[in-house]
Amino acid sequence: MITWIHALTNIELGILLMSIGITVSTVMPISIRYHFKLDYKSDALAKSAEESFKLVTTMTLLLLAFCLVRAQENHRNVEDLVAREATIIYKLNRDLGSYGGDEATVLQAKTQSYAQSMIDDEWPLLSTGERSVKTSALLDGLDDGSRQLIPATQRQQIAQSEILNILAQMSDVREARLSASHLSLPLYYWQAICCSIMVLIVVGWFQHPMFKLVIYVGGVVLGVCLMLALLIATDGVFIGQNRVTSLAIERVVPLIGPAEKHSFPVQSQMSPAL
């Protein structure tokens, strides 16, 4: 799809498509009929045009509904992927805390920096399907630092094994998210939608009488344009107003990092004076 169209809001996109649709489907044919003194009075032609219009309308709406379901499924899958990634980051920080020691504390700080880099550096690049070099470097540093841990107890050995396993999952989920940034409806779907809408508009031009062209055809085209606007708005997973955001990871960032040591004042218990 055209990239600039995703910069529009949902309302702007809907108004744009409905304006184009109503202009092409009703204003243009009415102007042509008045200008060239055209008036189709053939009942057979009007009947054939009406039946064809109904058939093409049904096919167009079914095609749009199918594509819309597919686009929504892509959105839900990516949202689940981002939520899973946030859970993995939180679990990594928790297991590093279970490991204990200064080395694990340093890795907890790196985990927080990695999550923040995902939000600040990598997320804006997802709209173009790119990855952040800084985020990749932070993930590599986490992996190297975890492998250099030297466990002194059996509990730390178990914790290190869990940490390495979680890092492998984190890398896999990140690659899946980066691959999802390229998700979109295949080109042949858009070609089929464009052809179907063009046929719908052309068949609508032959509707008779004139008020039927304005009310019947105009209403159907407005509905089709609304569904098309919704499809375009949800087609881009990481672009547009309805893009998948990093909210799940943003909620995790304040919960990870080195544990802060809070000191509480000790209240002295004094026996009441007799």
Image (spheres, grey):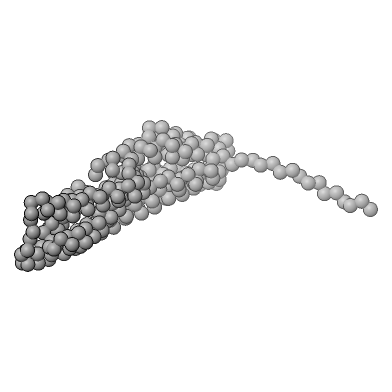
Q: In this view, does 107 lie to the left or right of 236?
A: right
- Give the image location of residue 14, x and y in percent: 30, 51
Residue drawn at x 38%, y 38% as measured from the top left: 124
Number of on-image labels: 0
Q: Can residue 99 be seen in this view?
A: no
* Depth check, front residue: 254 or 67: 67
Residue drawn at x 39%, y 40% as measured from the top left: 123
* Depth check, front residue: 152 or 47: 47
Q: Is residue 27 left or right of residue 264?
A: left
- Give the image location of residue 77, x and y in percent: 35, 53
Q: In this view, does 91 lie to the left or right of 169?
A: right
Q: Is residue 151 left or right of residue 25?
A: right
- Give the image location of residue 252, x and y in percent: 50, 46
List the single residue furthest toward the right.
274
Q: What is the quadrant of the N terminus in the image?
A: top left
Query: Is 225 placed above or below 152 here?
Result: below
* Depth check, front residue: 122 or 112: 122
Residue drawn at x 19%, y 47% as measured from the top left: 187
- Give the image location of residue 69, x and y in percent: 28, 57
Residue drawn at x 5%, y 67% as measured from the top left: 44
Query: Is 102 placed above or below 84 here?
Result: above
Q: Can residue 206 be seen in this view?
A: yes
* Depth check, front residue: 93 or 66: 66
